[in-house]
């Protein structure tokens, strides 16, 4: 837990006696300031290279895509069966071991502590004494830590260790049908998870099934962004006089007074374009598509690109046909704003999570796909979108959208806007991760927003933001690992919805 960046709603589920099961404890890795093209980068502000147009890394995205089954698991956490898995020796007076804080460690201490506690919980089930369980857990954690060269590797090793320990428990829940329920809740909630949800279960006031519809809407309202936050986070705001035009309160001073001169948001090269946006000179764009990552090496730290492990400033590892730019901040026309509507019959104005994909066109970044999911994690709208101008780079690595996908689509941005204006009202809660980026792609002005990048802040504060997949790895790790259901383009939207449901429950525990 990092007191320097308090979550606006208590310390985000950090239980005082549980340094491990912490929620908003800041565990983000290194951070780099957002560069000029931060809007161009999709969801990965964490550690990003200012010039890369990054997205979900193929590996993680594969894991993150497995959120489909989460709702059912979450709702099943109140199954009374779970009570049986409260470690029998947990009430022991023996002090649990604590991982000493190590500055600049390859794995944040609170993550290690979380897993140590989980290991202890398991060991207590089959060891003959608390001390034996502590020793066993400590040695397992030490092995995991020593085997891991990075935080992500540690997370994988630790989860596997946990699985191994679970399999050692007599009548292990891993061998029964409610395996996922237990592991899921245990990882999310830390060592007190079982107890805490038992309390919740009895109180009946915050059962999982209550967190839908109007009840979820009421709770989510506590996490809405203020107008001030919308402005300082670069959300498109309505122009006071001109309908259809957005204003941006964070507009960086663009040095490009010459409209024919652009700066490539991938490689940083200045290049010339014609009036229609076509590159004047045929010039390849040599860039790194990955993000900058800090790595510990003997004697200090080194920063490398995640794509090719190249050092900062090394020649790019990827060659694209031409330079590209973001451009969304320069085209603030064509925006629509959600309407005020009369209350609906079901008593609340709706909750949706959104995710957009974009590609580079002559104009800049344009929408190529939009996915909307509802609070039951069901896809309610998903369509490819034909950009207005000629595509120069499909950005497939990050968007997953290919030339073939767009070949047969005639849906335009205006069509999408019409659908969304019908689906949403001004009071509809839209959830997303750095949702301003999606709203810019949609050219949609909307003020009722829950942004998971704000709800789960980076420990260094703005402009640092944590990547969605980092949040997923930290909070919903177990779910990601347990589900293998293939690729699903709505994974990001689902992840945001799921993180918020988790966050609400976690905060409710603390208040209790
Ligand atoms: Zn590279
Ligand atoms: Zn370039």
Image: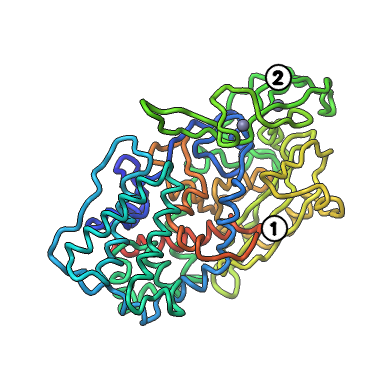
Q: Residue at x 62, y 42 (%)?
A: 238
Secondary element type, mark 2: strand
Q: Is residue 75 above or below residue 508?
A: below
Task: Point out the frontmost of discs 1 and 2.
Answer: 2
Residue at the disc numbered 2: 270
**Could one spot residue 394 in this view of the protein?**
yes
Earlier sequence position, callout 1 versus callout 2: 2
Residue 7 rendering spot, x and y as whole percentages:
36, 48
| Quadrant of the picture in which ligand 2 is shown | top right
Mark 2 CB within 8 Å of ligand 2: no
Dot 1, crowdedness within 10 Å: few (<14), some or many (≥20)? some
* Quarter of the image where the C terminus is located: bottom left
Residue sitting nearer the eye, 190 or 298 = 298
Tell me residue 327's x, y (percent). Answer: 70, 32
Q: Secondary structure at mark 1?
A: helix
Q: Is residue 90 left or right of residue 350?
A: left
Towards the viewer: 211 or 279: 279
Quadrant of the rendered image containing residue 448:
bottom right
Is the residue 65 above or below the residue 462 in the image? below
Q: Which residue is mark 1?
A: 420
Using the rendered image of the protein, determine whether residue 353 is visible from the camera's viewpoint: no
Q: Residues within 10 Å of mark 2 (few under 14, many from 20)?
A: few
Residue 340's label in the rendered image is none
State the colouring used for the structure image: rainbow
Q: x and y percent of residue 225 in the render?
A: 48, 49
Determine whether 18 is above or below 210 in the image.
above
Task: Measure how far apart labels 1 and 2 are at the Cα level.
Answer: 37 Å
Q: Is residue 184 left or right of residue 197?
A: right
What is the count of numbered marks? 2
Q: Which residue sits at x=19%, y=71%?
A: 128
Residue 217: x and y in percent read 49, 65
């Amino acid at each position: 837990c990092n007191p320097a960046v308090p979550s606006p709603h208590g310390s985000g589920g950090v239980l005082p006696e549980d340094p491990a099961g912490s929620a908003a404890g800041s565990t983000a890795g290194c951070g780099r300031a957002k560069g000029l093209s931060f809007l161009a980068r999709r969801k990965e502000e964490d550690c990003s290279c200012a010039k890369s147009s990054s997205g979900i890394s193929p590996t993680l995205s594969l894991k993150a895509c497995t959120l489909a089954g989460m709702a059912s698991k979450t709702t099943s956490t109140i199954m009374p069966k779970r009570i049986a898995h409260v470690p029998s020796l947990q009430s022991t007076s023996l002090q649990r071991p604590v991982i000493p804080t190590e500055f600049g460690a390859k794995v944040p201490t609170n993550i290690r502590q979380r897993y140590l506690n989980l290991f202890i919980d398991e060991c207590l089930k089959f060891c003959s004494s608390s001390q034996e369980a502590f020793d066993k857990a400590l040695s397992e954690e030490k092995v995991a830590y020593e085997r891991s060269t990075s935080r992500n590797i540690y997370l994988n090793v630790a989860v596997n260790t946990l699985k191994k320990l679970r399999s050692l428990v007599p009548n292990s829940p891993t061998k029964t049908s409610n395996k996922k329920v237990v592991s899921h809740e245990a990882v999310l909630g830390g060592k007190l998870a079982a107890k805490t949800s038992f309390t919740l279960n009895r109180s009946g006031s915050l059962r999982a099934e209550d967190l839908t519809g109007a009840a979820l809407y009421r709770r989510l309202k506590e996490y809405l962004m203020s107008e001030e936050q919308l402005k300082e986070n670069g959300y498109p705001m309505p122009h006071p006089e001109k309908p259809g035009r957005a204003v941006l309160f964070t507009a960086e001073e663009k040095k490009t007074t010459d409209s024919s001169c652009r700066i490539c948001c991938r490689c940083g090269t200045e290049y010339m374009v014609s009036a229609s946006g076509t590159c004047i000179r045929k010039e390849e764009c040599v860039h790194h598509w990955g993000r900058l990552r800090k790595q510990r090496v003997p004697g200090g730290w080194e920063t490398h690109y995640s794509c090719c492990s190249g050092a900062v400033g090394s020649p790019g590892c990827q060659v694209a046909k031409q330079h590209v730019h973001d451009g969304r901040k320069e085209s603030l026309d064509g925006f629509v704003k959600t309407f005020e509507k009369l209350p609906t019959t079901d008593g609340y104005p709706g909750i949706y999570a959104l995710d957009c994909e974009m590609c580079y066109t002559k104009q800049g970044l344009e929408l190529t796909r939009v996915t909307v999911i509802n609070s039951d994690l069901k896809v309610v709208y998903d369509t490819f979108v034909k950009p207005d101008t000629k595509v120069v780079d499909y950005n497939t690595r990050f968007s997953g959208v290919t030339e073939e996908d767009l070949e047969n689509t005639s849906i335009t941005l205006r069509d999408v806007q019409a659908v969304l204006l019908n689906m949403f009202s001004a009071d509809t809660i839209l959830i997303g991760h750095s949702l301003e980026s999606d709203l810019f792609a949609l050219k949609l002005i909307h003020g009722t927003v829950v942004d998971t990048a704000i709800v789960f802040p980076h420990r260094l504060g703005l402009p640092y933001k944590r990547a969605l997949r980092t949040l997923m790895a930290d909070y919903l790790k177990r779910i990601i690992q347990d589900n293998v259901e293939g690729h699903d383009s709505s994974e990001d939207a689902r992840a945001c919805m799921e993180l918020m449901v988790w966050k609400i429950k976690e905060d409710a525990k603390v208040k209790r």
